[in-house]
Amino acid sequence: MAGPDLIRTVLYTINNLLQQDKYKAALAVVKGFRNGAVYGAKIRAPHALVMTFLFRSGSLKDKLRAILKATYTHSRNLACFVFTYKGLQALQQKIQGKSLQSHSFLAACVGGWLVFGDNNNINSQINMYLLSRILFALSRLAVEKGFIPAPKQDPFPLFATLVWGIVLWLFEYYPHTLQPSLQSSMNYLYHDSNVWHDISDFLVYNKPRITGS
């Protein structure tokens, strides 16, 4: 019965350690790494699965390898960023004895440069996703702080008008400026729908099925 007793002792020691306030900052960094890894995998895996099977050619093995690679990269990068951000934030707070708004900004800047500064497809998607969110947030903050007047009417219809007008103009005349995954999606929607040969690739399939000779 030494095995169960040992497990109980180890669990008791770990749980006791987790309750110690003096280790809270360091433990929060470790859990942040864990949460980053889990969340990155949960977000990327279904997205990579859908996009790979919709738009990527190749064998099943190649597709599965691409899904796993994208999921691993997203999970690893997010975990490393959270670890770096929370670690630097805690370090600054310990040095200065209090928490400042600049701590969050500086820690995130360093983490962004180290982790998300590499120009690859995964990082590009994440950075552009965040860019759209912070533009919205900064607009709201500017209104809250009184830097710009509150709009008298809902600006969202104008926003949607400009977004769709600009993106389709870029797609039709300067497609090379758009991200490859966005180009693929738009090609499927707007260009592939201009081509068909019979009922099979008009309603059933997007493109004619290739049969062996």
Image (cartoon, rainbow, N blue to C red):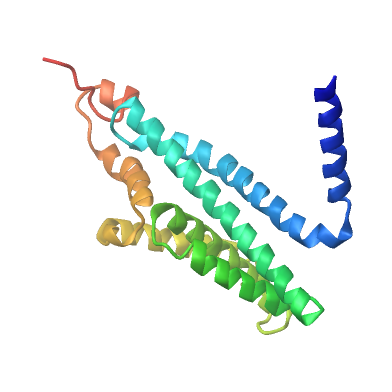
Vertically, is 7 above or below 154? Answer: above
Residue 84 position (above or below residue 101)? above
Q: Can I make out residue 152 in this image?
A: no
Given residues 25 and 13, the one toward you in this image is 13
Residue 53, placed above or below residue 157: above
The residue nearer to you, when weighing 158 against 68, is 68
Q: What's the residue at 22%, 25% (across, down)?
A: 208
Residue placed furthest toward the front: 2
Q: Which residue: 59% across, 62% down?
A: 133
Where does residue 27 sit, x and y in percent of width and height? 76, 55
Give the position of the C terminus as an image quadrant.
top left
Q: State the residue lying farthest toward the top.
A: 213
| Image location of residue 88, percent across then percent down | 66, 69
Q: Is residue 171 left or right of residue 92?
A: left
**Left or right, residue 186 beside residue 124:** left
Q: Nearer the viewer, residue 19 or 122?
A: 19
Q: Which picture quadrant has residue 58?
A: top left
